[in-house]
Amino acid sequence: MRLGVWLEQHGRSQSQFARELGVSRNYMHTIVRGKTICGRSLADVIAGATNGEVRPVDLGLDDIESRNVYRRRVSKNVIVL
């Protein structure tokens, strides 16, 4: 799921979410608009903060790498992709 869609569905603003994650509002805006691909660590934080609804691949990271990392992180919660 795209991050902008998730924010809208959950009634969250980009500014609020950026504060929660410790990044600037402007940086969050560029991620949401797809103008910037965030780093692996922030992508993992976003995936965790959205309960896996926004995956690293949704943020523009490599599909194969993202899938492997995501599976490792959520395997304890028995989420299967």
Image: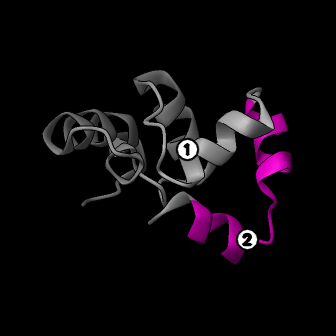
- For label 1, the crowd category at 10 Å Cα-Cα, with few meaning under 14, some 14 to 19 and many 20 or more, is some
Viewport quadrant of the C terminus: bottom left
Residue 20 location in percent, x, y? 81, 37
The amino acid type found where label 1 is placed reads Ile
Q: Does residue 38 lie above or below 52 as drawn?
A: above
What is the C-alpha distance between the residues marked 1 and 2? 17 Å
Give the mark nearer the N terminus: 1 vs 2. 2
Residue 26 location in percent, x, y? 74, 37
Please name the residue that numbered disc 2 is placed on: 10
Outermost residue toward the left in this view: 64
Image colouring: one colour
Viewer-proximal residue among 43 and 60: 60
Q: Residue at x 38, y 35 (%)?
A: 73
Q: Residue at x 80, y 71 (%)?
A: 11
Quarter of the view holding residue 4: bottom right
- In the image, taking residue 42 as reference, residue 58 lies left or right, namely left
Viewer-proximal residue among 31 and 46: 31
Q: Is residue 18 magenta?
A: yes
Viewport quadrant of the N terminus: bottom left
Query: Which mark is on residue 31?
Result: 1
Query: Which span is picked out in magenta?
Result: 4-21
The amino acid type found where label 2 is placed reads His
Residue 58 location in percent, x, y? 38, 54
Task: Select label 1 or label 2 by which is in front.
Answer: 1
- Dominant secondary structure of the magenta stretch? helix
Query: Which mark is on residue 51?
Result: none
Q: Is residue 3 magenta?
A: no
- In the image, taking residue 35 as reference, residue 14 lies left or right, namely right
Viewer-proximal residue among 25 and 45: 25
Q: Does residue 1 lie above or below 9 as drawn?
A: above
Residue 43 location in percent, x, y? 47, 35
